[in-house]
Image (spheres, rainbow, N blue to C red):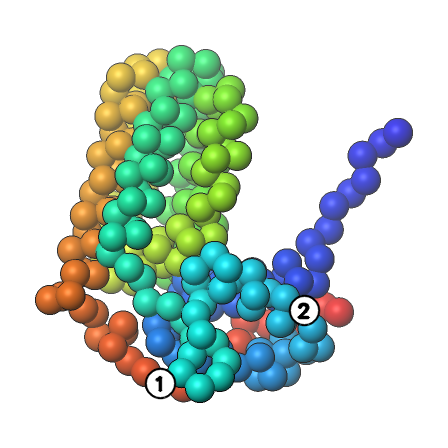
Amino acid sequence: MCPLPTQPTLVDQVYDAILSEISAGKLAPNGRVIQEEIAESLGVSRQPVQQALLLLKRQGLLRDAPGRGLMVAPLDADYVRHLYEIRGMLDGLASAKAAERGSEAARKEGPAFIERGRAAVATRSIARMIATDMDFHFFLYGLSGNPLIAEASNVHWSYLRRVMGEVLLHGETPADIWNQHERILEAVIAGDAIQAERLAREHISHASQTLTSRLLPSETPKSARRTGGSRRITAGKTTR
């Protein structure tokens, strides 16, 4: 039998649309998320929106609002730090194994990922920058030859998208991120596992330090103090 083609479900599409708005800062921390407004903006019924919101709440991206409804959960510095500790270990391992097992594939295919990433930076689209960043890291996971690395990482990537959005909005310069990616790729192409792992860990550690320093109580960003109302999702209609 031939594998069946997979299509994202309506719930998946709604989930991705809401997460993209949160990651891009268009749904601000502590801002209310109104189910009816999201359904109207996306052109869908309330049921897939409700399911998507429950998933986002379960993953810690939304929380109960005072009174009723949901609101965007502020980032927690300790949680982000713990998350990046895990990610640093996984990305370091992936890069080292990619250098050992996938240097030739990295040489042939890797530069295209860097080009797409820099093209995304030029558009100033947070969604595109996050997507190309994810593509690069999952490319390295694939080169590692260990499918469990991607499987272990995938559990955290919804929250990481939110964190990456914050880094891109208020942290590192996006061009610097891709310079770091390029150096990691060069080490992988050279087959230098020690250097690839070191650079990957430094890349993750720097992003973690940049963001968690902003999230400490004394450095609470203005966006986390805003309590404005909900924002309509206008990223485009979702097909029924």
Q: How many residues crowd around disc 1 within 10 Å: few (fewer than 14), some, or many (20 or more)?
A: few
Camera sees residue 113:
no
- Left or right, 6 with respect to 34, comes to right
Residue position for label 1: 228
> In the picture, which quadrant includes the C terminus?
bottom right
In the picture, the disc for residue 184 is none
Q: Residue at x 56, y 65 (%)?
A: 54
Location of the N terminus by quadrant is top right
Q: Is residue 161 above or below residue 14?
A: above
Residue in view at x 36 percent, y 24 percent: 93
On screen, residue 118 above or below 19? above
State the residue lying farthest toward the front.
67
Asked which quadrant contains residue 44, the reply is: bottom right
User: For this rendering, which residue is in front, 178 or 93?
Assistant: 93
Which kind of residue does numbered mark 1 sit on?
Gly
* Residue 4 visible to the viewer: yes
Residue at 39% in and 79% down: 31
Label 2 secondary element = helix
Looking at the rendered structure, the secondary structure element under dot 1 is: loop
Name the amino acid, label 2: Pro
Q: Viewed as shown, does residue 101 lie left or right of 52?
A: left
Compare residues 148 and 222 and report the one nearer the observer.
Answer: 148
The x, y position of residue 21, in whole percent, is 46, 68
**Percent of width and height locating residue 97:** 40, 18
Q: Position of residue 34 (x, y in %)?
A: 53, 82
Nearer the N terminus, badge 1 or badge 2? 2
* Residue holding disc 2: 48
Name the residue rendered at 23%, 40% in the picture.
Answer: 205
x and y, in percent, of residue 112 in the image: 46, 35
Q: Residues within 10 Å of mark 2 (few under 14, many from 20)?
A: some
